[in-house]
Image (cartoon, rainbow, N blue to C red):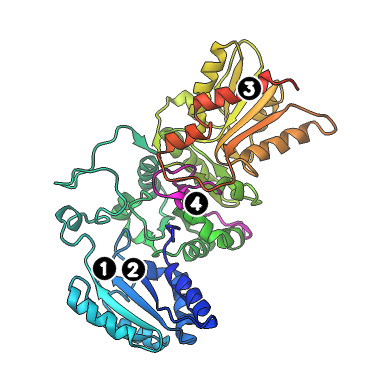
Amino acid sequence: VENSHASTALSYAFGLSVARDLTDDDATVVAVIGDGALTGGLAYEALNNIGYGQRRVIVVLNDNGRCYAPTVSRLTVAGPEPADPAAFFTSLGLAYVGPVDGHDIDALELALRAAAASDGPVVVHAITRKGEGYGPAETDEEKRLHDVGAFDPETGVPHTHSGSSYTGAFAAKLVELGARHPEVVAITAGMPGSTGLLDFAERYPDRCLDVGIAEQHAVTAAAGMAMRGLRPIVALYSTFLSRAWDQLVYDVVLHGLPVIFCIDRAGITGDDGPSHHGLYDLALLTKVPGITIFAPSSYEEVGVMLDEAMKITSGPVALRWPKTPARHVDASAVGQGRTARRSLRGNDVCVLAVGKMVEAAEEAAAVLDARGISTTVWDVRTVPLDSRMLADARAHRLVVTAEDGIAEGGVGALISSALARLEPGHQGVPVLTLGTPLTYLPHGKPAAILANLGLDATGIAATIQKALDTPA
């Protein structure tokens, strides 16, 4: 199963066991789940059904006290506050075997054989140590070398990468906001390091909450905090935000609560597998009434947008940024309603680009200008859309939108509709929307994927050239 999302194994196992029992199969269903994944609500729901229905399922609990970060649970024996997990599982109707040393192969085999002989559901509780046997992993306090880039295998030291990150910009600004605003709290779902919260957690430990791998709970908890005057900042990956969609729409937005969502790994994420691309957040969030969306196109924009977000108290705000490096710009290239580039020769094309696509659009504009095609570039920057941007765009022969999310129903579609409303009853300026297709994108480097989709500077320039060369 390739979904890269935690807490799902037990629901798959329950479904497989139901199918087995209804087809007179004799297969053994075995689910392996980590203690970190067991903090997710989906896992508890599945355990309840497995135990209640007495489905013959073997659950192997790999308990190492961690997911990315230390596990937020008292069920883990490997954690700092061990409880009695046997009572928890048996109360749900599952037999319990263990705890057993998961690094002792003989002992583990005996435990598994005992479980296989059971007529009902059973948990084999194996205690392991994440990174066991590899010194650099054992001494990595943040995440035991989980989810890392290239590094020196002898020392575990990552190979250095040039450039800054959007996450780094967020991490620095969050500490500053924490100092100025005692009402700011940060919330993460099991990933404080990856979402940039470690510095804030060190400075303000009581105001940084890791709720475990429980995005739904994180969002509704943030709603409760906002109801009592706090300013919650919920830091999640784009692909994991979709797990809390219902809570965002009805628990936060419907009530007009000033929760700030900081959405990392938005757009084409790269070599983390097909399920980690953050392709849907723009298409989804632009359909939610009362939410303000920001998409920074540089390191400096992150801090500016967070300051603007703090001023919005009438409802929620979402900032979304990619995993890829963040460029640096000077002060003149930061701010609301920004024209990123303007041609002085005419009004052939206006490109309205979102977030990281601004840089590619500027590069494409330079190529087109060299060919005699006058090109203006706007940094869309925020939704609701800037009225001056729309007015300027409609004065061009062609409008092109570019975003690193699905084109269908995304920001480009929103812009196209807005321009049409400016000229009711008329054909108006043609709009070409560029974005990702409605398909699952492969594992790969972001630059290569963008190039293959025609969403790099070369591809954008070629698409515009072709559109202009094609008779209307």
Q: Amino acid at mark 3?
A: Lys
What is the crowding at mark 1: few (fewer than 14 residues within 10 Å), some, or many (at least 20)? many
Q: Compared with residue 322, is residue 245 higher up or lower down, i.e. above or below?
A: below
Q: Of circles 4 and 3, which is in front?
A: 3
Classify residue 426 by image quadrant.
top right
Task: Judge left or right: residue 31 versus residue 387.
Answer: left
Total number of numbered labels?
4
Sequence-first tag of 1 and 2 = 2
Q: Which residue is mark 3?
A: 466
Closer to the chain start, of discs 3 and 1, is 1
Looking at the image, which residue is at 37% across and 79% down?
A: 58
- Residue carrying label 4: 261
The segment highlighted magenta reads: 253-280
Separation of disc 3 and disc 1 at Cα? 56 Å
Residue at label 2?
34
**Residue type beneath disc 4:** Phe
- Badge 2, how many Cα within 10 Å: few under 14, some, many 20+? many
Q: CA distance from mark 1 to mark 2?
A: 8 Å
Residue 397 belongs to the span the image colors magenta:
no
